[in-house]
Amino acid sequence: MIRVAVADDQDLVRAGLRMILDAEPDIEVVAEAAHGSEALDVVAEHSPDVVLMDIRMPGMDGLEATRRLAATPGGGPHVLVLTTFDSEEYVYEALRAGAAGFLLKTAPPRRLVEGVRLVHSGEALLAPTVTRRLIESYVRRPAPGGGTPSALASLTERELEVLTAIGRGRTNGEIAEELYVSEATVKTHVGHLFTKLALRDRVQAVILAYETGLIEVG
């Protein structure tokens, strides 16, 4: 069972999210919060696996709450930022704060449910409408042709292939198909490169792939 906490300052929004998620056999909403500091309290009390976090809330906003959750021992729960704001700056700051994904409130219920399951499994989730603008506007990349950055020098050729695929948004299953290996082998490579590069999750891996020029926009 995936345990979820919902943090949003609007009662009707929280009620709607609860109704959608509680209808799923493998998801249970265990707590609600109306602002960031309350979100920290309910996480400490209920230990959810996933937190649906609004960005704009009174008092402590969702970005600061996400930063504090990411800084807790063990990394805290997976945070899925859910908002009406699709500004690139909000997306970038949410991911930098430690969010595992970003989804607009205009997404259909099916996408919300899939998003909760996805981030719970350790995958990254970015709304397609904002991903490219995020990369183009906020991630600095070296000029093409600069060779393999020193940050990636410790990786094997296969690990570089896996990191490149992660940067392109591929799941472990898709990477396994592309490289003609088992999904278990992909998971092993992912674990090794995360350890070597001190990455917390796939979101950080995607950002690194673009920052180092391993992936080129377009």
Image (cartoon, grey):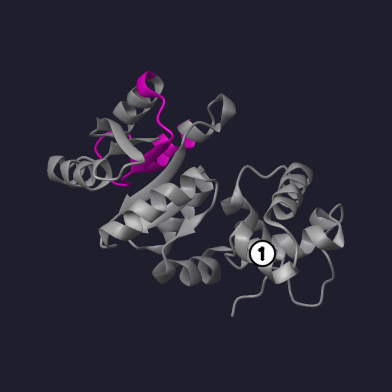
Q: Does the magenta stretch include residue 15?
A: no
Task: State the residue lying farthest toward the top.
Answer: 45
Range of magenta residues: 45-68
Look at label 1 and name its amino acid: Ile
Residue at the location (67% across, 68% down)?
A: 177
Residue 161: which quarter of the image?
A: bottom right
Residue 91, position as x, y percentages in the image:
43, 57
Q: Which residue lies furthest to the bottom in this view?
A: 218
Q: Residue visible at 37% across and 57% down?
A: 103
Q: Residue beneath label 1, please?
A: 175
Q: Identify the element where label 1 is drawn.
A: helix
Q: Is residue 104 among the parts visible in the rendering?
A: no
Say which quarter of the image contains residue 155: bottom right
| Residue sitting nearer the eye, 179 or 216 | 179
Q: Position of residue 54 (x, y in %)?
A: 31, 45
Image coordinates of residue 137 in percent, x first then y, are 51, 69
Residue sitting nearer the eye, 123 or 40: 123
Q: Position of residue 8 (x, y in %)?
A: 25, 41
Q: Quadrant of the N terminus?
A: top left
Quarter of the image with the C terminus in it = bottom right
In the image, taking residue 22 as reference, residue 217 lies left or right, namely right
Residue for point 40% across, 21% down? 44
| Residue 103 visible within the image | yes
